[in-house]
Amino acid sequence: MSAVGRIVLGLTLGDPAGIGPEVMVKAAFDSTLNPAWVRVLIGSPLLIRHWCRRLHHPLPPDWQPGSGLARASVVQWDPGPVLDAFPLPGQCRAAGARAAVSWIRAAVQAGLAGELHGMVTGPINKAGLHRAGVDYPGHTEMLADWMGARQVGMLLMGGGLRVVLATRHLPLAEVARRLKGESIEEAAVLLSQGLQWMGVRKQEIAVAALNPHGGDQGVLGREEQTVIEPAIRRLKRAGYSVVGPIPADVLFYQARRGRYGGVVAMYHDQGLGPLKMLAFDSGINITLGLPLVRTSPDHGTAYDIAGRGVASARSALMAVRLAGRLARRPNPWRTNTQRPTGPRI
């Protein structure tokens, strides 16, 4: 696929009506990136041309999987569908969601075929996916299905924190009922493997409590005693370095000061609230468990500022940097796959 030392990363544009096309073009052309990393902008040439002109970048040359080594550091690939008109910024549309999903699917297929070393995905909108009839709540589940990954986890990084979620996109009212020891164990194992993959020296993992004050011995909830503590005991017996459950109002302060290599949070906002407070415009999302490197900026489509040219690309740039570094390291999940399923669109 490429000469020695060349890393090829696919950058999907995300929802056409969000800030994804803007931040991905900004990140792709950042002068601080390793010039040996080929950044393939995957999506509509209409969007790429618009943002290159607006940001005063040259239009990248065309590239296709199987076409050989790209000579430029930034190239573009249009896998379809063709956008007939420029999307209205900030408008959540089914057509835009379908286009975004098709670009993700193309990146997955190219990656599994060995044409890409990794992928960095632009933000998509869950409401748009729903309107388009896409039967996935987000990137994580979609990529796991398409790549045949048995177990996956969301690792969020930023501000000195590394957080994996035991539950992902659930209404808060359902978290306690659907929290299982198996999901906590899976998150901790994936996090442990991820820390080794990234070369993090501190390997101890802290598991957050679910309830205030860790349940106060059952007075404020019994999930710590019935679900979390048994999972931690099983992890320790299996040889993993884990501690907890630790109340979240203490845990993140300790983790920020470097006491732990990473944190297993019980639900979405428990983990992402502290992280985004510290790294709102520089957080990164890494999908653990995939046979292909996948990172993304840790923000959404930001429809409220889409099209204005004011979106920060720092998070997208950090995601590209991490994808390039991880692509050079042995992937612990290269063989952790079963036969991939067909896309559900």
Image (cartoon, grey):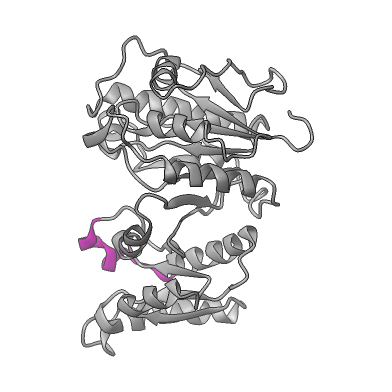
Location of residue 190 (image quadrant): bottom right
Q: Quadrant of the C terminus?
A: top left
The structure residue drawn at horizontal position 46% and vertical position 65%, both measured from the top left corner, is: 160
Q: Nearer the viewer, residue 20 or 227?
A: 20
Q: Is residue 192 above or below residue 280?
A: below
What are the residue bounds of the magenta stretch?
171-181
Taking the image as drawn, is residue 141 in sight?
Answer: no
Taking the image as drawn, is residue 251 in sight?
Answer: yes
What is the chief secondary structure element of the magenta stretch? helix
Q: Is residue 167 left or right of residue 155?
A: left
The structure residue drawn at horizontal position 39% and vertical position 17%, both measured from the top left corner, is: 50
Q: Nearer the viewer, residue 38 or 125?
A: 38
Instruction: Give percent across and percent down for residue 279.
Output: 38, 57
Q: Say whether residue 175 is magenta.
A: yes
Q: Is residue 73 above or below residue 250?
A: above
The structure residue drawn at horizontal position 56% and vertical position 45%, both measured from the top left corner, is: 321
Q: Quadrant of the N terminus?
A: top right
Instruction: Give percent across and percent down for residue 195.
Output: 58, 63
Q: Is residue 312 above or below residue 267?
A: above
Q: Nearer the viewer, residue 76 or 57?
A: 57
